[in-house]
Image (spheres, coloured by chain):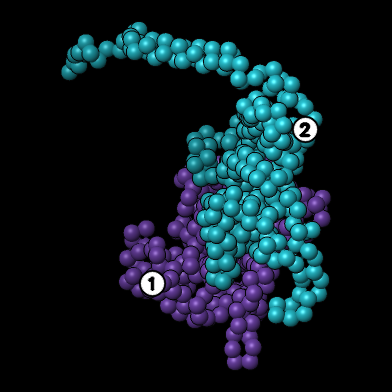
Amino acid sequence: MNVTEGPGLRPRRNPKRSPWRYVVIAVMLFLALALADVVLTNPNFGWPVVGQYLFSAVILDGLLLTLELTAVVMVVGSVLGVILAVMRTSTNTFVARGAWAYIWFFRGTPLLIQVIFWFNIAALFPRISLGVPFGPTLAGIDANALVTPWTAAVLALSLNEGAYMAEIVRGGLLGVDRGQYEAAQALGMRPSKVFGIILPQAVRTIIPPTANQLVTTFKNTALVSVIGLADLLHSAQVVYALNYQTIPLLIVAAFWYLLLTSLLSYFQSLLERRYSKGYVPRSRPRAATGTSDAVALKEA
Amino acid sequence: METPMIVLRGIQKRFDSVHVLKGVDYSVSRGSVSCLIGPSGSGKSTLLRCINGLQPADEGEVWVDGELIGLRIDGDHVIPLPEKEIADQRRQIGMVFQRFNLFPHMTALENVMSGPLRVNRADKERTRDLAMGLLDRVGLAERADHYPNELSGGQQQRVAIARALAMKPKVMLFDEPTSALDPELVGEVLSVMRDLAAEGMTMIVVTHEMGFARDVADHVCFMDEGVIVEEGHPDTVLTDPRTARAREFLKRG
């Protein structure tokens, strides 16, 4: 039987582009030009001031502190997150519920409140002491001396970070195939060694959300400016409090935040490639015989 | 008479309301190959997992080479061992899974080395020699540096066998080792298992490969609905079963 081809079924050689396409391009171009006009000709943007402070010592010191804070918080938060994630999957319900309550509390309250809370912990406990509950005190220290803006910032951000990382790590651990646990157990591995087999596999799925979390944390550190810690934002604020150049200095801070978040995204893609080892076929496929390859990939 | 390598007594297992194993007594003598056959859902795989405690039995005892697995006798009571000690006991019980379960982030060689290195803290150079020897034995020495996803199903299963053997186990448990394979890849895995049997390894094989059971097994158990319905020499059980249920099953197979 002959299939007669209707005119509408023939593939078009030159698919006609919608005329709206050009309208959209024209509108976009117009908006971009308008934006450039405003940004470049409005003197209140203060571009010379931006240039003057972009690499100034006070701003760079603030940037350094922001980076240090981010690094410390990410490390402490990740360790805390792994511990909490393992606790949440524990067969001991007491341990599992404890971790759940922790995550519930720290994810459920605003980070800004947590930052201010830890900074003002001295109002709650004027002296922080080690001792037996309801018993004798072994050692004590004045809370205001112990909880500096730096420790308050590290505490608040790390404890909060731990709660978010716990959920990310838990998701990764749950994503590893049950058979992997069984295979490790069957070899005679103790629980800690089994974890050593599972975690690297979980890391692959943990990386993308962790990198997002890193970017979020990096930006969240700006909250510590409220407790007077000289981070990037606070440093900019100190300068504009003196010279009233608020917008230019916010642009300076935003520039550095944007540059660093872009760099972090780049490193994220590098890391993801590294941990895809054994999951994505290598550039030169060296797989085995004939049809079985497809099966092997499917099975893996 | 020599004590059997594996003895199971009164094994019971429930999953929620489902009674999977209803009191299984079973033993395997030293150096022999025993095949567990039967319809799916009959409890074969669960029985196998009770032996190394991956799914501990609710009731009953498992003895491997004279050692009680997963339990400690304290007077009139039996007390479950802590997970660490069960893990130590599993070193002498190798297991091969239906879906291979190779560690995907390790090469074939690293997979085979993983047991001795991580469990026994063995010397790295000596373990490498041992692992290369085992990969050679399963015919995959030249694939040592490949990741599992670069190997065929049959090759992956042979690596999995080598990985289990690296712990120098006293017994080997096979849980439907060829069921996830393309038909043309079944032979290479069975041939490795045949060699292992010939070398005197004590093996329990859950399988649907009646040919393998007939040729290699010293003993065949037919299980159905959580009990061993019939057991004995393969010639008897496979060709001339006493029970109607076994006859029915083998006719279908």
Which residue occupies the foreground of this view, A200 or A282?
Answer: A200
| Amino acid type, residue under disc 2 in the picture | Val
Residue at figure coordinates x 33%, y 61% from the top left? B251
Name the image quarter holding residue A266. top right
Q: Which chain is purple?
A: B
Q: Quadrant of the N terminus of chain B?
A: bottom right
Q: Residues within 10 Å of mark 2 (few under 14, many from 20)?
A: some
Read off the residue under disc 2.
A58
- From this view, report whether residue B227 is shown above or below residue A296: below
Q: Which residue lies furthest to the top in this view?
A: A14
Which residue occupies the foreground of this view, B22 or A25?
Answer: A25
Whether residue A33 can be seen here: yes
Residue at figure coordinates x 66%, y 18% from the top left? A47
Q: Which chain is cyan?
A: A
Read off the residue under disc 1.
B18
| Amino acid type, residue under disc 1 in the picture | Val
Q: In which quarter of the image is the C terminus of chain B?
A: bottom left
**Secondary structure category for the residue under label 1:** strand
Name the image quarter holding residue B120. bottom right
**Secondary structure category for the residue under label 2:** helix
Q: Residue furthest bottom?
A: B76
* Whole-number angstrom distance, CA of label 2 to CA of label 1: 70 Å
Q: How crowded is mark 1: few (under 14 residues within 10 Å), some or many (20 or more)?
A: few
